[in-house]
Image (cartoon, coloured by chain):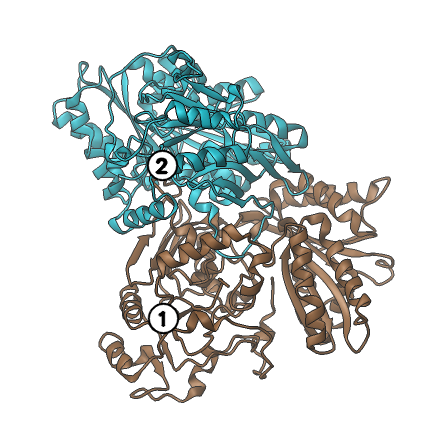
Chain colours: A cyan, B brown
Amino acid sequence: MLFSRQLARRPLIRAPRRWTHSPAALAGLKSVTEDDLVHFAHFLPPTSIVSTLSPSAAPSSELESFNNDWMNKYHGRSTTVLKPRTTEEVSKIVKWCNERRIGIVPQGGNTGLVGGSVPIRDELILSLSNMSKIRSFDDVSGILVADAGCVLQSLTDYLAPHNHIVPLDLGAKGSCQIGGNVSTNAGGLRLLRYGSLHGSVLGLEVVLPDGTILDQLTTLRKDNTGYDLKQLFIGAEGTLGIVTGVSILAAPAPQASNNVMLALPKFENVLPLYKETKRQLSEILSAFEFMDRTVYDLAVKHGQGRALNPEDVEGAECFVLVETSGGKREHDEQKLNSLLESLMEADVPLINTGVIATSPAQFSSLWAIREGLTEAVSKEGKAYKYDISVPLYKFQEVVDKTKNHLQEKGLLHEDAVKYVVGYGHVGDGNLHLNVVAAAYTPEIEAALEPFVYELVASYKGSISAEHGIGAMKTHALKYSKNETSIEWMKKIKALFDPNGIMNPGKVLP
Amino acid sequence: MLFSRQLARRPLIRAPRRWTHSPAALAGLKSVTEDDLVHFAHFLPPTSIVSTLSPSAAPSSELESFNNDWMNKYHGRSTTVLKPRTTEEVSKIVKWCNERRIGIVPQGGNTGLVGGSVPIRDELILSLSNMSKIRSFDDVSGILVADAGCVLQSLTDYLAPHNHIVPLDLGAKGSCQIGGNVSTNAGGLRLLRYGSLHGSVLGLEVVLPDGTILDQLTTLRKDNTGYDLKQLFIGAEGTLGIVTGVSILAAPAPQASNNVMLALPKFENVLPLYKETKRQLSEILSAFEFMDRTVYDLAVKHGQGRALNPEDVEGAECFVLVETSGGKREHDEQKLNSLLESLMEADVPLINTGVIATSPAQFSSLWAIREGLTEAVSKEGKAYKYDISVPLYKFQEVVDKTKNHLQEKGLLHEDAVKYVVGYGHVGDGNLHLNVVAAAYTPEIEAALEPFVYELVASYKGSISAEHGIGAMKTHALKYSKNETSIEWMKKIKALFDPNGIMNPGKVLP
């Protein structure tokens, strides 16, 4: 999902907690004491220790940005943040915490959306932000090895002169860290083209819950020597260990990018359009983003740009943003133009109209509509956000059924739910379902949950396509994972983290 | 690696075993008895049971193709092959074997190169060949769900009219099964373009060693709900459970394919050439295969095709086969032609000469050289084959150092080692090092091992880039995986398979 960085800069407003946690997971865990700080001071410099405890005695305001997430929805009460500079320091901290039974929350850029990176109680926060060195880059193979604390944008900037890109892009790139991206298996905007991190991450260095350093930081594209353990840490949200280093396959930078916004008369046309687009654009298709009419209109209303003239889009039921990225501008443009010609000349046209970006500014302004949806929605009211995977042809049905359900409950009016909208990554089967209400109320929440989760489960979908489980959705995991899978997840957790110190209360119910 | 299907059809010749196994892993395991067969007959039809025991009493010749690998290098002595038709039948078999402590070897097409799919002793062979149904295909998302026993070629044939391809191709495609491909994390010819199975496999159905069916057969491109357990089974070579169903993301079929064979004056030019090719061909580059001069000459000598005129390749130190696959023929040809022009016109040329295929027949004949290397080598003598990953710029060094080492040992002459050759997938960092000898001798083997493994380890390489560990390389695992990694692999094995019944003696030392 994209969220705009403007949102991240808003002042923190205390909002009521809307999630439940599992205190059971934290029951046996100890708080950090002054004695612990004395121990940490043996191998960490004062600048690596931020604590309200003596002898540091920092004001609690210094911990605010670590204890609260950017949406200000999840609030921890940690007394102590440690910022190790090396993997060995991480190992020493973790070893001590494991012996002392102190819970640890690994924290990257703290840009997650499900409360995975802030403490539930007063767990120690281990920030990776001081580990931000690029360890190596091979511009022949494209293999980049970096500390986990490298900010995504800084990697992008580093690779640009080498004519490569990180195979991952998301709205939070200015703050999020590669270790956090890996730990949450971040999806984002380039997944359609470059695939998931399970494919592009080649190796990891992980500090396990007992302090052992598991070095699988290979720089090999292929290595078939036994179990691919690193995969377990991709998407484990820090509950199995702390990712400290990442080896990732960077992609050659595309030489040209184009985009086009298309207006469609009806939702049923989205899938034939996707098929035709895939067929004609083939390897240069890099994004195929869907927006329903309601959310498009909200974006226009709130000044997120205007792609098409109002009279041209009369009767359009939804919109699609198509992006190409390729190696040769004239070839890409030819492919895109011939796609558009064939669409416009079809006997039964799939689209009403469309606009193609002819300058970098127009390219950005088309993306601005898509990227501005979250902000437009938030200006309209309080949004219940569901990030789900469902079969592509069910996108509209999910939106419609949710809307009907709310109507049946008498909740679809100006003072309750104002809009039910859908947008997302068609290519990835990933729908962002947003229910925009006048206010967060228990009544609406009860109408939505478990309704939405059950709906998703009925399509054999995922209740979290890319945001993860964090603290927010542990109770809903059962809608996407069967009992056997959850049981095995628990066994894996118990094997790696028998004392339950790693990001306690997250992921598992 | 490619191996030609002609080889697979050769009559079996008993060769001395050149590998050691770990009988310890089999120590506590029981043999199949007639009572077991009675039990299996309760839920399996007679056609699903092939056994030399009563009441089946099949001649042992019927088990020959199951007990021996296609190279006739590994020989099992199993009495019984079961061919279940459903996942439930697999589950019942496994549950029984787990209770009775009977070792199981899951077997797909039995095309592996490291003895992973034949018994070490008399383990029960569970053949997936009767599970060969395609369960579903969605031509919008490209997601294919198939039984594990589907032969790779049959999936390719099924997808062709839907304009899709399996994101995997290898020489054994006429026999190998998708479940075996997944279990061995097969690499092959399309990896450069479509990435590894860790990225393209979306879901698996696995029968665990206690008979539990782990259903993670999702058809979702994105699902961030907890640990990605299926990844553990990709490349586990059947030691953690039996893959019975696979969900995989098929790729849109390319509309055009081209290739070109290039002769290079020296190895040092391979990497600049690779960089330039990647830059100019970008997203349409689908293969970049390296051959050293010696192996190229062997291919020519043994009639595997002749790409270039002898006088044109005088002085060429090595060769590269470049393939493109793209969505529009004229665009692809333009890109390839302008690459070749820039290569020919360079002030300091990277290549001596090259030949571009201008017909499907020429396209095939250029590939025939590359695909014929294994056969050419085998016609020349007995080959010690190493399938390794090393940094790209070390390819030639590995070949040269191995050659020098053999020379120092006095083993480089007509009656001992005749050739040391290298070829492989530059784009994947995967070198096939072949040492061609007059005969397999303990002296040569002692000179090569652990020398080659230590050499690979010194580059932080992999001793098995794509072939796996199987029974052949368990003793050498330590050269590619550190102690911590092996220890954790053992813990994972013990967690899933506490009785050690699943493909015993394979992968782990």
Residue carrying label 2 = A501
Task: Tell me the amino acid under the disc marked 2.
Answer: Ile
Q: Residue at x 50, y 50 (%)?
A: B484
**Real-space Cα separation, disc 1 to disc 2, in angstroms:** 46 Å
Instruction: Give coordinates of residue A256: x percent, y percent.
Output: 61, 30
Q: How many marks?
A: 2
Q: Could you say which is closer to the camera, residue B286 or residue A469?
A: A469
In the drawing, does residue B69 fall left or right of residue A75? Answer: right
Figure quadrant of the N terminus of chain A: top left
Question: Are dots 1 and 2 in contact, CB under 8 Å?
Answer: no
Q: Quadrant of the C terminus of chain A?
A: top left
Q: Amino acid at mark 1?
A: Asn
The answer to whether B15 appears left or right of B445 in the picture is left
Q: Secondary structure at mark 1?
A: loop
Determine crowd level at label 2: few under 14, some 14-19, many 20+ residues with C-alpha closer than 10 A.
many
| Figure check: A207 above or below B379 | above
- On the rendered structure, is A326 left or right of B235? right
Please state the chain letter of the residue tagged with numbered disc 2 in the rendered image: A
Name the one closer to the observer, A230 or A311.
Answer: A230
| Residue closest to the eye, B86 or B392 | B392
The local crowd at label 1, few if under 14, some if 14 to 19, many if 20 or more residues have their Cα within 10 Å, is some
Whether B462 is drawn above or below A129: the answer is: below
Measuring from the top left, give residue B304's x and y in whole percent. Answer: 71, 69
Q: Quadrant of residue A506?
A: top left
Name the residue located 37 percent from the left edge and 74 percent from the top edge: B29
Q: Which mark is residue B130?
A: 1
- Residue nearer the viewer, A461 or B37: B37
- Same subunit under labels 1 and 2? no
**Residue B146 seen in the current view:** no
Say what secondary structure mark 2 lies in.
loop
Q: Chain of mark 1?
A: B
Residue at x-position 78% and y-position 40%: B342
